[in-house]
Image: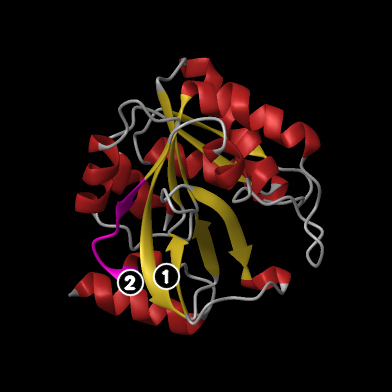
Amino acid sequence: MLSWLIDLYRSWTTAVVVVAHPSALEAMRAHVNAAGMTGTVVAQDEPTGMLDAVGIGCDAARAWNPGRVWVTWCDQIGVRSDTLERVASAEAGTDLTFPVVEREAPYIHFDRDAAARIVGVRQRREGQPMPERGESDMGVFSLSADAAFNHLPAFAETARPDGSTGERNFLPFIPWLARISTVATVEATDPMEAVGINTPAELAAVEAWLAR
C-alpha cells in the first residue's frame, strides 16, 4: 500500500514523510529508500490519535520548507489521480482543500451552514447521530504552510481527546479552521475512493475495483 501511494503522489509531491509505529521504523525507512523518493520516517510513540500523527508529520515536513503539505491515511489507496488533480487545481487561496464524497450510512459526516461552510463534523465511532446519507472525507487533505505549521499547532494546544476512543482526532480541525480561514472541498470521482482498508472484505473490494 505504501509503494502504491508513493507512486500515486509522485506527480504532486517532492518528498514524503511516513509516520509509523516505533517497531516499524527501520522497515519503513528501507521501503521509502527503495521507492526512490526523498523522504523520512518518524515515530508516533503512543497511539494518541490522528491529530497528533499529522502534527508529527508536519513537524518533520518543515525541513523542506514546503508551500503546501498533503496528508493521506496510508490505507486510503483507492484515490484516483483525476481527483488529486482537482484538489491541486482548487488549492489557490485556501488554507485547506480536500475531496469529499456522498455515501449511504456514512462513517463521517460534515455539517454545513446556509453558506455551505463546514461548521461541524460527526463521527460514527464516537457514537454521534448520523444521517442516512452524508458527506464524508476520503483521508486526503491539502494544507497550506500556514495551516500546517501555525493553525494546526494552535488547534492542537486546546484539542481534547474524543469521548469514546480517548484519541485526538484530526477531523475537528476542519470546522475550527473554516471559522477563521478558507476551506474548500472538491467532488470525488467515485465513492470507492473513500474506502479505507481495515478488513479483508475492504481489501478484496478495493483490489477488484483498482483492477478494473
- Mark 1 residue type: Val
Numbered label attached to residue 192: 2
Q: Residues within 10 Å of mark 2 (few under 14, many from 20)?
A: some
Question: Does residue 183 appear left or right of residue 108 in this picture?
Answer: left
Front-most of residues 172 and 195: 172
Closer-to-camera residue (9/123): 123
Label 1: which secondary element: loop
Q: Position of residue 23 (x, y in %)?
A: 70, 49
Name the residue furthest front: 114
Q: Is residue 17 visible?
A: yes
Question: In this figure, which residue is indicated by the disc labeled 1?
Answer: 195
Residue at point 50%, 30% (across, down): 181
Residue 45 location, x and y as percent?
A: 77, 43
- Quadrant that contains the N terminus: bottom left
Label 2 to label 1, Cα distance in Å?
A: 6 Å
Q: Quick check: 201 left or right of 13? A: right
**Quick check: 182 left or right of 121?**
left
Asked whether 189 falls inside the magenta stretch, the response is: yes
Q: Quadrant of residue 78?
A: bottom left
- Indicate the secondary structure of the residue bearing disc 2: helix
Percent x, y of residue 8:
29, 48
Figure quadrant of the C terminus: bottom left
Q: Are marks 2 and 1 in contact (CB under 8 Å)?
A: yes
Measuring from the top left, give residue 72's x and y in whole percent.
46, 48
Residue 60 visible from this viewpoint: no
In magenta, the rendered stretch is 185-192
Question: Which residue occupies 27% across, 37% down?
Answer: 88
